[in-house]
Amino acid sequence: MYKAEIITYSPRANDMADKAERKANEMEQEGWKLVTMTVTGSAKAILLFHKEG
């Protein structure tokens, strides 16, 4: 099973990294593992998670 999560507008790299780290840690608590992350041209990000089952 896969799930995509969006990180809202974050034009500063440090802010983007903090948000991505928090989201990845939050999702890992629920059993999801981060597969990949893509940053868009509009300073947003898409994180793709995977969970067995």
Image: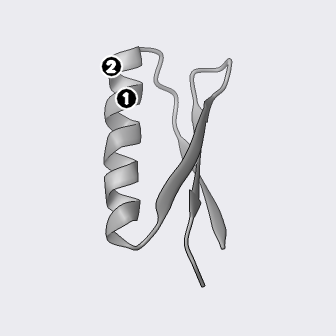
From the image, tell me which residue sits under label 2.
14
Which secondary structure lies at badge 1?
helix
Which secondary structure lies at badge 2?
helix
Number of marks in picture: 2
Residue 6 shows in the view: yes
Query: Which residue sits at x=55%, y=72%?
Result: 51
Residue 46 shows in the view: no
Query: Badge 2: how crowded within 10 Å, few (<14), some, or many (20+)?
Result: few
Residue type pointed to by label 1: Ala
Give the side of residue 29 with respect to residue 41, left or right.
left
- On screen, residue 16 above or below 8: above
- On screen, residue 30 above or below 41: below
Image position, residue 18 (x, y; %): 31, 33
Query: Badge 1: how crowded within 10 Å, few (<14), some, or many (20+)?
Result: few
Q: Nearer the viewer, residue 35 or 40?
A: 35
Image quadrant containing the N terminus:
bottom right
**Colouring convention used in this rendered image of the protein:** one colour
Image position, residue 11 (x, y; %): 47, 16
- On screen, residue 7 above or below 14: below
Give the residue at the far top of this rendering.
12
Residue type pointed to by label 2: Asn
Query: Which residue sits at x=41%, y=73%?
Result: 31
- What mark, if any, has residue 6 been given in the picture? none
Disc 1 to disc 2, C-alpha distance: 5 Å
Mark 1–mark 2 contact, CB under 8 Å? Answer: yes
Image quadrant containing the C terminus:
bottom right
- The image quadrant of residue 4 is bottom right
Image position, residue 40 (x, y; %): 66, 25
- What mark, if any, has residue 17 been given in the picture? 1
Give the residue at the far bottom of this rendering.
53
Query: Which residue sits at x=31%, y=46%?
Result: 22
Image position, residue 44 (x, y; %): 58, 30
